[in-house]
Amino acid sequence: MKRMKKIIVTILSLAMMMGLCVTVNAAESDQNYNEIYYTVYNENGEVVDEGIIPRTTNARYHWSPNITLDNGWYTSFRMPGPNAFYVTSNTAMKFSYSLNRSATIKYQFMKSSQRSTPYADVWKTGTITAKNGSVTKTADSTAYYYVGITNASSDAITITSVDFTF
């Protein structure tokens, strides 16, 4: 009986030591390739440019080509369709941008009760003067949201990167 206990203890000890030598790696996360849609409007509300920015990670949009906005021009960042992003109540939404120079922009967080957003309501608005800026707003209700910016400086600006995280 004592000999059997020794054998069992030895086998269990060896199994535990061998278990420490085994390398375990987590599975690689799936890449989710969707995209974000942008539309540029001139000061008269006419569409000047539109395009698609690739999305490579969950809930984070980053893009590095450029969009140029003349004075008074506006661009919106939405899902293709163009549709707004579904955001639940009390979720923080962070919009960050980089410009080619320091300039004043007017940002607008738009809110709608419907995914399709031809005429969403202005929910939150403000101005920022900087080359790189960010603003965070917390959703007050579950709805559909997107962000837009207007060039409020005298000369043209170039948007060099955009992040929209929620």
Image (tube, rainbow, N blue to C red):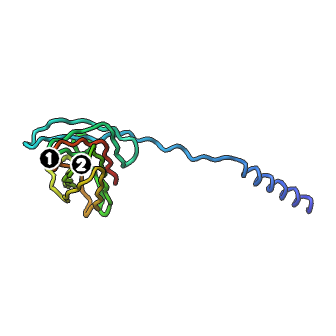
Q: Residue at x 77, y 53 (%)?
A: 17
Residue 88 percent coordinates (x, y): 30, 58
Residue 96 percent coordinates (x, y): 31, 51
Report the side of 95 relative to 74 (left or right).
right
Report the side of 18 relative to 131 (left or right).
right
Q: Residue at x 26, y 53 (%)?
A: 130
Furthest toward the left, the residue is: 44
Q: Name the residue under label 1.
A: 154
Residue 77 percent coordinates (x, y): 24, 45
Distance from Cα at disc 1 to Cα at disc 2: 30 Å
Secondary structure, mark 2, is loop
* First in residue order: circle 1 vs circle 2: 2
Q: In which quarter of the image is residue 76?
A: top left
Mark 2 crowd level (few <14, some 14–19, many ≥20, 10 Å Cα) = many
Whether 54 is drawn above or below 16: the answer is above
Q: Nearer the viewer, residue 52 or 79?
A: 52
Number of numbered callouts drawn: 2
The mark closer to the camera, 1 or 2, is: 1
- Report the amino acid beneath label 2: Ala
Rendered-image quadrant of the C terminus: bottom left
Rendered-image quadrant of the N terminus: bottom right
- Report the amino acid beneath label 1: Ser
Label of residue 84 in the image: 2
Secondary structure, mark 1, is loop
Q: Nearer the viewer, residue 124 or 84?
A: 124
